[in-house]
Image: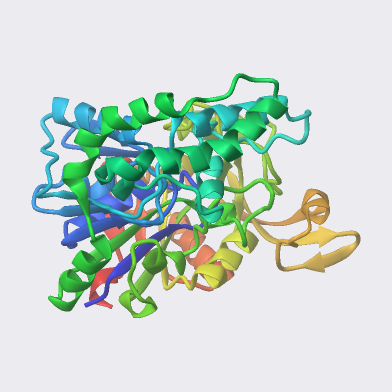
Amino acid sequence: MANVVVVGAQWGDEGKGKIVDWLSVSADVVARYQGGHNAGHTLVIDGVTYKLSLLPSGIVRPGKLSVIGNGVVLDPRHLVKEIAELRAKGVTVSRDNLRIAENAPLILSIHGELDALRENSAAAGNKIGTTKRGIGPAYEDKVGRRSIRVMDLAEPSTLNAKIDRLLSHHNALRRGFGLEEFRTEAIRAELDEVAPHILPFMDRTWSLLEDLRRQGKRILFEGAQGALLDIDHGTYPFVTSSNTVASNAPTGVGLGPKAIGYVLGIAKAYTTRVGEGPFPTELHDDIGRAIGERGREFGTVTGRARRCGWFDAVLVRQTVKTSGIDGIALTKLDILDGFDTLKVCVGYRLDGETIDYLPASQAAQARVEPIYEAIDGWREPTGGARSWAQLPAQAVKYVRRIEELIQAPVALLSTSPEREDTILMHDPFQD
C-alpha cells in the first residue's frame, strides 16, 4: 500500500482535480503541499461542478480528511470565501475534515497589490504572466523570514511587532512605486477579521500526518501547478514561486521522503500553457484553436484562454525524470477525436543540432524548434470510454507511442470530465 503524490507533468491545467477526486475514493487523507489560490481545480460530481483553488480536492468527499500543508501560502480571505461557496452547495467543512498547518504563511492584501504593481509595470516581453494574487511576494516573505503565519493569529500580543517587521520591507517597496505606506493598524484589522474563521482549523499537521501514516492510512499528496512551473526545474523565469516537483510533497506537509510510495504524473494528450514563456509546440492555426474550443481551455482562476499545441514528449519525459514519476494519468484523450493526423514532439533542433531535452537557458528555450512525428488519428469517439477495449485501435497506438517516448507507463486514462469516465491500468495505491 503506497501513499501517492499527484504532480502535473506539464505547465499545469492537466486535469489534476478530476484525478485527485478519482483517487480520493481510495485515500483517507488529501494533503495540499505547495502553491496558493493561483491554480484552480474543477471537479464534476453527480452533475455538480466544484471549482477549488485552495482547498484540497478531497474536501468534497465525505469521510476524507483534507490538510493544507506548511508549503502552501494561504490567503485567509479567499479561504473563507471558498468554504462559504462549498457550504452553499451542501458540502460540510469543519475541523473534522479540514486542518491547516500552524506554520503556513499568510497572503495579505499587501502581497496582492505588490504582485499587480510589478506585473503591470513590467515592460512588454518581460511580464511573467502572474495571476496577481500575491503568491510570489508571499513566498518571498517566507524566505525572508518576515511572514505572518497561521499560528501568529493565535498570539495577538506579539502580532503588531511582526506586522511592523513585515511593513519595514513592504513600505520601502511602496515608496519606490510612489505609493502611500501601509499602516500597522490596517493590517492588524485585516488579520483580526479573519482569525476567528481560520484558527478553528489550525493544527500541528506534521504530527497529525505522521500519526495517520503510522496507522496505515492512505495519504494523497496534491500539488497546484505543473512541474514545468517549478522554481528550479521549470521554464525560468516564467515559473511559479515554489517547488512543484514531487520531491517537495513531503517537505510541504512536514513528512520525510519515505512517506512517498508512488508518484503519479498528470499530462494532457496535448499541451497547454497559460501566460507567458516558451512553448515549443504551440499552434497558432485552426488546429490550435479547435483544440482550445473542444477542450474548453480557459483558466479556472483567471478565465484566460490557454495556449494550445501538440503533445511534447520531450518535456514530459524530462518531468518524468525530475519528479521521479512512476506512471502517468493521461487526460483529455477525447479532445483529439476526429483529427486525421496528430503530431508528437520527439526532439528539438537548437542552432542546427538535435537535442532531447529543454535547455535551461531562457534564450535557448526561445530558439528551440520542435521535431515532430506524425501519427494517424481516429474517427471513432473515445469520449466516455471506461475500458481499454472501448478505445479505437489507433487511439491505443497513440497512447502506446506516448508511453515509449516519455519512458513511463500510462496508469490511468481520462476520457471526459466525469470522474467515472476513467480507464485504470494500474492502481497507484496498490504499488
Q: Identify the residue at horizontal 36%, vertical 41% (top origin).
A: 159
Q: Identify the residue at horizontal 56%, vertical 52% (top origin).
A: 144
53 relative to 20, above or below: above
Q: Residue furthest right?
A: 352
Where is residue 102? Give x, y as percent.
29, 53
Q: Identify the residue at horizontal 67%, vertical 42% (top origin).
A: 282
- In the picture, the quarter occupied by the N terminus is bottom left
- In the picture, the quarter occupied by the C terminus is bottom left
Residue 426: image quadrant is: bottom left
User: How are the residues colored?
Assistant: rainbow
Q: Is residue 121 visible?
A: yes
**Left or right position of 409 against 407:** left
Q: Nearer the viewer, residue 376 or 188?
A: 188
Residue 75: image quadrant is: top left
Q: Nearer the viewer, residue 199 or 363?
A: 199
**Left or right position of 147 against 373:** left
Where is residue 191? Give x, y as percent.
33, 32
191 relative to 216, above or below: above
Where is residue 17? Give x, y as percent.
33, 46
Q: Nearer the viewer, residue 23 or 230?
A: 230
378 relative to 328, above or below: above
Residue 90: image quadrant is: top left
Q: Is residue 410 visible?
A: no
Q: Identify the residue at horizontal 78%, vertical 28% (top origin).
A: 124
**Left or right position of 78 against 406:** left
Where is residue 239? Give x, y as percent.
61, 48
How many dots with numbers?
A: 0
